[in-house]
Image (cartoon, rainbow, N blue to C red):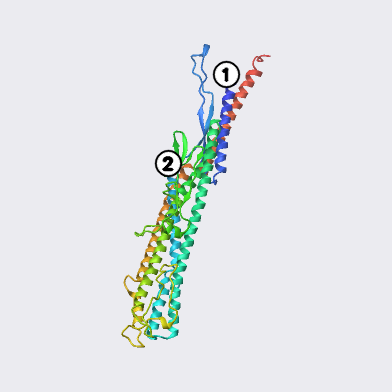
Amino acid sequence: MSTFSGLNTAMTGLNAARVGLETTGNNIINVNTPGYTRQRAELTAVGALASTGLNASRPGLGQGVSVAGISRLADAHLEARLNATSGAVGHADTRAAALMDIEATLREPGENGLSAILGKFWNAWEGVANQPGEAAPATVLISSANDVAARLKLMHGELSDQWSAQHSALETMTAEVNSTAARVAELNASITSTIAAGGNANELLDQRGTLVTRLAELAGATSGENEGVFEVKIGNHVLVSGKTPHELTIAGGTSLETSAAGGAPTVNFDVQGGRIAGALSLLGPANDTGTGGAIAQMASSLDAVAKNLAETVNAAHRQGITADDVPGGNFFDPASTTAAGLTVIVSSAAELATRSKDGGKLDGSNALAIAQLATEKGGADDQWSTVVVSSGLAAQAEAQQSVNAALAHNAAASQQQAATGVSLDEENVALLAYQHAYQGAARVMTAVDEMLDTLINRTGIVGR
């Protein structure tokens, strides 16, 4: 190796230290950048030149150092775990929030809840029993009955609004999945072309990783290489394959009523996780086992309570006679016994069958018997109490599930950040190391320069 080659060796050290300083500085600057993955300059020793001629037997020295590349310190296992927990927390959060909204719709316990309104309704029957045929207690009773019907209709309307809001959110999330998938496909093309040209695609890989995590939160997406092609999958369906995105679409009903008729919304992919899966589980139709869509299931429970109330009160009312000896008829319209359609058809004291068939003019035993339906096992109150308790337990369970999913997600995010995020302490140490390396390489170059100065400018002048 000639003396002049020492300059090149020193130059490689300067270049390597400079790249290391720039990489470290880039890490420090991006310490708070979401989705940024720590990078590192990969240095490798340059081997000795082949030795030929008279000096072939001498061992050759290395030619310095080269920068093999800038590596991205990602961990595929931690990324996969983060994406899996993102899907779980998205699913749990969506369901927990919806079930809390459903529970809030019930307004139980409280003076505006159906339990309190039913209590006033039964008390009004006792008032009628004490003053049969009188207009004032009859007016109170009819008003209380209308309050019950209005409360059931209001809750059904709120559930219908919640269903529509969830469906609107589903449409928004589906559109976001499609736009994000298209962006991932674009990044795949950019990454491929950048790497093929010998460039650094680390920032593009960070952007793609952030987008895949969002797809995992929305639809439980997973990602990986398949025969050298980067793919994003939802279940067993491919959402993105290299440069090609595929579209997620929604079909089915667009209202609570159409869902109840069996036209629940569906998507063309097998979505098992994420917020979209949570929304789909909420928008499903009700079933007899109580495991259907939460919103439609609650609407079905309201219908069952309304039907129970109408049928039991109507049956008891038909057992009596009015103050004018007219056989009692239906109190509620039997043609419409749903929560949205419950209607009081009695309009005056003369239509109330307060007497038993064997009672006298002042007999209110039939009205009292109707009032006692409040405590009947399996009656409307008992059924409503079961609905309220079940709703509360379900909301509590989903809230706990959401907390558990969040804990798992936070743990996964912390582990990924610890492994791939920027540590200012580590980067400051690296900064000092590269700084000293640069200074050392510069000192080597200065020494070689002084040697060459002596060799070139001072050789042959001794003795002059």
Calculate the distance from the C-alpha at mark 2 to the C-alpha at mark 1.
49 Å
Q: Earlier in the sequence, mark 2 or mark 1?
A: 1
Q: In terms of secondary structure, where does tag 1 sit?
A: loop
Quarter of the image where the N terminus is located: top right
Q: In terms of secondary structure, where does tag 2 sit?
A: helix
In which quarter of the view is residue 155 placed? bottom left
Quarter of the image where the C terminus is located: top right
Whether residue 167 is visible to the viewer of this picture, yes or no, is yes
Left or right side of 376 for 163: right
Counting the numbered discs, the total is 2
Q: Are marks 2 and 1 in contact (CB under 8 Å)?
A: no
Toward the top, the furthest residue is: 54
Whether residue 207 is visible to the viewer of this picture, yes or no, is no
Which residue type carries mark 1? Ser
Judge whether 376 appears above or below 398 on screen: below
Disc 2 crowd, CA 10 A, few/some/many (<14, 14-19, 20+): few
Instruction: Kindly identify which residue carries mark 2.
Output: 77
Numbered badge on residue 420: none
Which of these two is toward me, 191 or 17?
A: 191
Residue located 47% across and 64% down the image: 158
Which of these two is toward me, 400 or 449?
A: 400
Left or right side of 410 for 446: right
Instruction: Kindly identify which residue carries mark 1.
Output: 2
In which quarter of the view is residue 142 placed? bottom left
